[in-house]
Image (cartoon, helix red, strand yellow):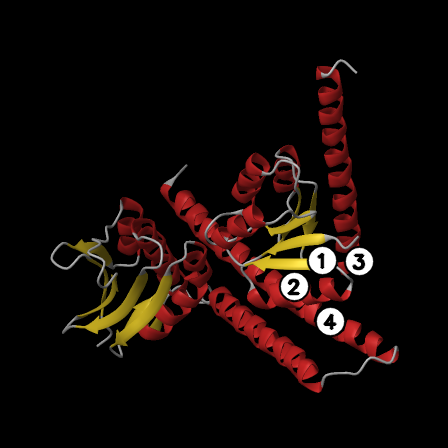
């Protein structure tokens, strides 16, 4: 199943080119160049992975990550940064980011991480579904 | 910490801030070039497998790479100018050129706050000053001004000439914002035998220097 990805970055050329490369690899990709567009995109659709730039003008990646984790806790977020400091990486992971990569990113490595994000999300969704089914069965005494 | 040590520390902090900003911008340039080059590779692989190549697409990617190289070159040139501004303790400088350099070095700081910097009318004023300290002063004044401004506003720079002085004026046209000065900025200006003060009449921030006769 094609991975559904939202790419968030304020550098338009980077966004356009990376999204094209990801589509050539069979992914279903949407893009957002600022926080407002990103929040709108996330509310409109369900993504397997969000690839998010750490430094953006209107809302930095950590703040955006907090917003996403609060509203869509199952969505897997991969942070991209020009400066992958250990502190920023630790903070991101503590806040629930799935992974953290430094720009320029290797597309094969990024693709692998996106596939893992999809798999992780599917496990979470399956567990939730299983839980709900058990609840329903339990309520009916089965 | 002694006063001169504090000054050195502040200078280092300024240089560190600008270096960090420049390195981040250069990383972004590399990121675009990396993806563009990667895309050329992807399209070539597809062509090898028999898919037709779109020459316009290839041209667009090549143009993007060239554009980013120019962008990177500009960023590095400005950083190099900042680095060389430390060569002399005092030098006769063209205020307009230094303002343009300081604006270029501060653009990312403004972009991250969704604000703009612009250079307006500049008189051809020359002053004898430490080029590095002047850039540091302008950067500090810019940072102070941006903290007062709201998103999408523009900070304008101009240079005016009087009989015995030349003044760099920072203003935010059409926003009703009064730019202020702080002790650190005043001290930095005083260290260069200049003055930094807010003009309460028109809300501008003025950095004044003795003109070279």
Q: Are marks 3 and 2 on the same chain?
A: no
Q: Tell me the number on the disc at residue A108.
A: 3
Q: Give the chain of mark 1.
A: A
Residue in the foreground of this view, choosing between A48 and A89? A48
How far separated are the C-alphas under marks 2 and 4?
12 Å
Q: In the shown orientation, is residue B148 left or right of residue B60?
A: left
Residue B192 at x, y = what percent?
Answer: 30, 58
Judge if badges 1 and 4 mark residues of a common chain. Answer: no
Q: Residues within 10 Å of mark 3 (few under 14, many from 20)?
A: few
**Residue at the extreme bottom:** B55
Q: Tell me the residue at 67%/85% (across/down).
A: B56
C-alpha separation, residue under disc 3 versus residue under disc 4 = 13 Å
Residue B39 disc label: 4
In the picture of the structure, the residue carrying the numbered disc 1 is A105
Question: Which of the two discs, 1 and 4, sits closer to the camera?
Answer: 4
For residue B31, the mark is 2
Q: Which chain is mark 4 on?
A: B
Task: Check if mark 1's residue and mark 2's residue have beta carbons within 8 Å.
Answer: yes
Q: Mark 1 near mark 4, Cβ–Cβ under 8 Å?
A: no
Q: Quick one: label 1, few (<14), some, or many (20+) residues within 10 Å?
A: some
Task: Judge whether B47 appears above or below A44 on screen.
Answer: below
**Residue drawn where x is 56% and y is 49% of the image:** A44
For marks 3 and 2, give the CA distance. 15 Å
Residue B14 located left or right of residue B3: right
Chain where mark 3 sits:
A
Secondary structure state at the residue bearing disc 4? helix
Q: Nearer the viewer, residue B175 or B120?
A: B175
Q: CA distance from mark 3 to mark 1?
A: 9 Å
**In the rendering, which numbered label is found on residue B112?**
none
Q: Same chain for marks 3 and 4?
A: no
In the displayed structure image, the side of residue B155 where residue B174 appears, left or right: left
């Amino acid at each position: 199943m094609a991975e559904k990805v939202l790419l968030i970055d304020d550098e338009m050329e980077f966004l356009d080119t990376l999204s094209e490369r990801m589509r050539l690899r069979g992914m279903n990709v949407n893009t957002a160049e600022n926080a407002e567009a990103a929040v709108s995109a996330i509310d409109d659709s369900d993504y397997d992975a969000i690839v998010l730039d750490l430094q953006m003008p209107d809302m930095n990646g950590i703040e955006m990550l907090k917003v996403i984790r609060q509203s869509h806790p199952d969505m897997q977020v991969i942070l991209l940064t020009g400066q992958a400091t250990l502190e920023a990486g630790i903070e991101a992971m503590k806040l629930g980011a799935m992974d953290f990569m430094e720009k320029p990113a290797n597309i094969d490595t990024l693709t692998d991480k996106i596939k893992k994000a999809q798999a992780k999300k599917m496990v979470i969704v399956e567990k939730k579904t299983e839980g709900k089914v058990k609840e329903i069965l339990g309520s009916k005494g089965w | 910490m002694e006063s001169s040590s504090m000054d050195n520390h502040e200078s280092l902090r300024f240089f560190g801030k600008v270096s960090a900003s420049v390195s981040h911008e250069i990383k972004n340039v590399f990121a675009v070039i990396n993806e563009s080059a990667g895309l050329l590779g992807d399209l070539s692989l597809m062509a090898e497998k028999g898919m037709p190549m779109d020459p316009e697409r290839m041209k667009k990617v090549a143009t993007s790479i060239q554009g980013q190289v120019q962008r990177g070159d500009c960023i590095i040139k400005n950083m190099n100018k900042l680095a060389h501004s430390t060569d002399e303790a005092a030098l006769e400088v063209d205020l307009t050129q230094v303002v343009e350099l300081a604006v270029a070095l501060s653009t990312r700081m403004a972009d991250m706050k969704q604000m703009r910097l612009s250079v307006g009318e500049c008189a051809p004023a020359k002053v004898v000053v430490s080029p590095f300290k002047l850039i540091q002063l302008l950067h500090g004044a810019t940072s102070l001004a941006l903290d007062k401004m709201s998103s999408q506003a523009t900070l304008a720079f101009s240079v005016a000439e009087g009989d015995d002085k030349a003044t760099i004026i920072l203003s935010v046209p059409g926003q009703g914002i009064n730019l202020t000065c702080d002790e650190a900025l005043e001290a930095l200006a005083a260290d260069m035998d200049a003055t930094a003060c807010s003009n309460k009449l028109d809300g501008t921030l003025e950095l004044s220097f003795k003109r070279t006769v």
